[in-house]
Image: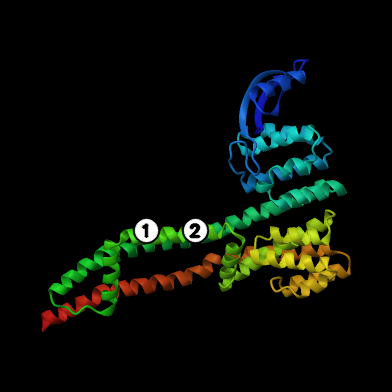
Amino acid sequence: MSTLSFEYRAFTADGKETRGVATAASKAEAHRQLIARGLTPVLLRAAGEIGVGRGAKGERIKPRDLAHFTYQFSVLVNANIPVAEGLRGVGEQEREGPLRDMIFDLVQRIQSGQTIADAVGVYRAQVGEVYVETLRAAEKTGTLGQVLEHLSEMLERGVETSRQVKGALMYPACVVGVLVLAVTFLVGFVIPKFATMFQRHGSQLPIFTKILLEVGQSMQNYWWAYLLGVGAVVFVFRRLTKTDDGLLLLDKLAHRIPYIKRILIGIGVARFSRILGLSLGSGLSLIEALTLAGKASGRPLLRRESIEMAGKVRAGATLGAVLGESTYLTPFARRMLTAGERSSEIPRMCSVVSRHYEREASDLTKNLSTVIEPVLVVAIAGVVLVVAMAIFLPMWDSMKMVGS
């Protein structure tokens, strides 16, 4: 039977108001649980079925909200406030939504005796495996507050990087979209009308006009085929993003684009280094840390390489040896991490590498629109030139015939 989450507002025996979330198979069962705890419920409503990786209403938690929650969580832990009590206070201040539902659910699970990692592990698909396993190791080593601070910082940097990429691509995407619509209209409707007029006057159509005329006529006659083609491309792309082999193929293609390759490598190496240092500092073994760092990098190529490195370490190789065989990590990253192993300061060197490549990736992302604009201008000029030649060359021929 599925477990449901019920938000409640109740009064204790001494008249104090309390709020929280009760988990039960039914509303009646939740009501009985509250009565058994000595509470008098005045409000009891279903928050939804608890799902792995989703909030009570099946909505995803925004990365920025998760980062903010993680920071608040770290403050509570560092202030030595009881976890359940502190989380309840955070949940009461949170607005209605999936994050609030998750927080109250965590409170209920922790009060029932679960560890923090086990409670958060219910939402593994949402917060990520790295988040859960790092918390688990931090609980064992007593570094939970410090680890939560690092996780919060990592999430904030991820949100900022995503915002920068979206901002840099917004203008080019709008321009390309308008250009595609304009060219579609010209090729599909304007050029065929001009071509018909020129043919009536006996003008010889140039090759550009003939090609675009054929394309325009095919668009008018077989528009459904074009729509099916676009739909097929979208379908194939989405299917590729849902498989490991597909993601690996897309990652290989993305790394063939010169400037984009530098950004992807910078972001991947920065995340890899930060999680590697964070995991080792939390008490995880080198094998576990390498595996988690590869998964957290966000780059399928680096993830595959990290699994291979972890396997070699398991077989007895040193970190420096496996890093020397890496084809994804940059020479600077390999040197620094190898030096960290020799000096027994891998976490500190990981921090140096991650900060370096975070700054580099941020600078490259900010300049992305500057790099794209010249390419975009050349592409637009080429399209305009082809369309203009397709229209004006027959017009000049017609004028010559009239003049003669």
Q: Earlier in the sequence, mark 2 or mark 1?
A: 2
Q: Secondary structure at mark 1?
A: helix
| The residue positioned farthest toward the bottom in the image shown | 404
> What residue lies at 62% left-to-right and 42% top-to-bottom?
54
- Is residue 167 visible from the viewing direction of this image? no
Q: Is residue 155 above or below residue 177?
A: above
Q: Camera-side residue: 25 or 149?
A: 25
The residue at which mark 2 appears reads as 170
Query: Which of the 4 quarters of the picture holds residue 361?
Result: bottom right
Q: Is residue 263 above or below residue 47?
A: below
> What residue lies at 58% left-to-right and 41% top-to-bottom?
59
> What residue lies at 79% left-to-right and 59% top-to-bottom?
289
Disc 1 residue type (three-letter): Leu
Measuring from the top left, give residue 199's x and y in whole percent. 16, 74
Colour mode? rainbow
Q: Camera-side residue: 142 or 156?
A: 142
Q: How far apart are labels 2 and 1 at the CA level?
A: 24 Å
Few, some or many residues within 10 Å of mark 2 (<14, 14–19, 20+):
few
The residue at which mark 1 appears reads as 227
